[in-house]
Image (cartoon, rainbow, N blue to C red):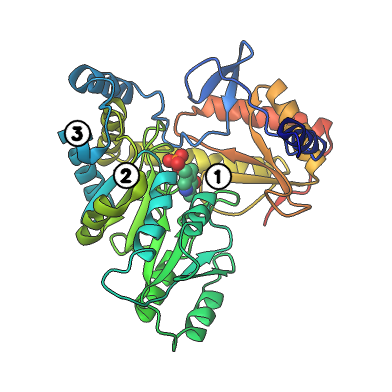
Amino acid sequence: MADYLELVGGELRQLEQNKTFKYEVPLQSAQDGVVEVRGRNVVMLASNNYLGLSNHPEVRKAAIRGIKEYGYGVASVRFICGTQDIHFSLEKKISKFLGTEDTILFSSCWAANEAFFASLTNEKLGMETYRDVIYSDRLNHASIIDGQRLCRAETTDRKIYGHADVDDLVRQLEEDRAKEYRLRIIATDGVFSMEGDLAPLDRLVEVAGRYGAILFVDDSHGVGVCGKSGRGTPEAKGVHGKIDVLTGTLGKAIGGAAGGYISGRKELIAYLRQKARTYIFSNSLPPAIVYGASAAIDLLMKDRSLVRTLKNNTAYFREEIVRLGYTILEGEHPIVPVMLGEASVAQDMSGALLKAGVYIKGLWYPVVPKGEARLRAQISAALKRKHIDRALEAFEKVGRSMNVLGHRGVT
Ligand SMILES: *Cc1c(COP(=O)(O)O)cnc(C)c1O
């Protein structure tokens, strides 16, 4: 018999030694363009608060109204007594925004992704014998991977294709063409969070159509961010309204509190209300969040200035950080990976930047490949030009003192 506390203690020491221990720095303020850390104001470059709605006056007001009109919580799952009319209203609003037929809310996008795959593949649906297959992008989010892990191996084949590699996907679909699969599902992130790159959704829509596959896209980092009106990666790639199954979070651009959804054909959504285990056996979203998310989408639909500010801020930061002599990954997304190479450089630099008034996180092996350690900047519409300039000054000062400037470029 082993002592479990000794086992977990050993693992914790290992994480510290490998420099993969995740430290939490408490904010002493609301999430915003500038936050308070250890009694000091610092520029936030690490949040998913892309549109700056986490602490937006309209969203705050709506959330408070939610509590006033509908209370703090419903103390129930949806189908027993946890559905309020505002849940259906928000679902309708999301469908309208995304150009889909219907939407089902979850407590998180994690819960949505965990529900989707098994709800379809583990059910016979009138067929005594069957096999399904899922093709998944190599860099898909952990929640997509875990969602697929719930699929029974006896009835589901799970395959991985190279990151954003449509040719590799087609090769595998072609290889499986003669197999009598019941369902073929292609699963991808809309935006990949380590690189800030967009999935080739235009090509994936075409390929899914050609092979009769269901295209599943988790657009958590895309919704509210990508496309002219913030409708997400499908809009940016010219395939708005053409994705079979769209999931996403309300915990990033769309208010930043919590909640997730699956959006798609009405038959599928009706089916998921009957079968999705994280929907049926888990509490419905509280009114404050429902109203807050709803206000966030209203703001987005009312005018495009939030999305425009985000895009302008992103373009400005990308241009200026390269001018300073940093190397970034090319793109347009507010996720801007600043490439540093060695893990120790990224570690030291994120610490030095916090001291210099910038909150930013580093990523290194095993989260990204060895030698590709980076700082991941995330730009927000909450940032004023002066805040971005303050961050850039800190980047210049710290970069100079650590001697990492001068490898100017975009890769
Ligand atoms: C953030 C994220 C999630 C998790 O969303 P929650 O609503 O916080 O559970 C799921 N998928 C992707 C791609 C994400 O980026």
Q: Could you tell me residue 396's position as x and y percent?
A: 73, 32
Residue 227 shows in the view? no
Q: Which mark is residue 81?
A: 3
Residue type at the position of mark 2: Tyr
Task: Give, as a three-letter code, the residue at label 1.
Answer: Ile
Q: Residues within 10 Å of mark 1 (few under 14, many from 20)?
A: many
Q: Which mark is residue 335?
A: 1
Instruction: Give the percent coordinates (x, y) of residue 246.
Output: 35, 55
Above or below for 226 versus 356: below
Residue at the far top in the pictured view: 39
In the visual, does 411 lie left or right of 212? right
x, y percentage for residue 80?
Answer: 21, 37
**Sequence-first disc among 2 and 1:** 2
Which circle, 2 or 1, is nearer the viewer? 2
Residue at label 2? 279
Mark 3 neighbour density, 10 Å: few (under 14) some (14–19) many (20 or more) = few
Q: Residue at x 72, y 30 (%)?
A: 5
| CA separation in Å, label 2 and label 1 | 31 Å
Q: Is mark 3 within 8 Å of ligand 1?
A: no
Q: Which mark is residue 246?
A: none
Marks 3 and 1, how far apart in space? 40 Å
The kind of residue on which mark 3 rests is Cys
Q: Looking at the image, is mark 3 or mark 1 earlier in the sequence?
A: 3
Residue 392, picture quadrant: top right
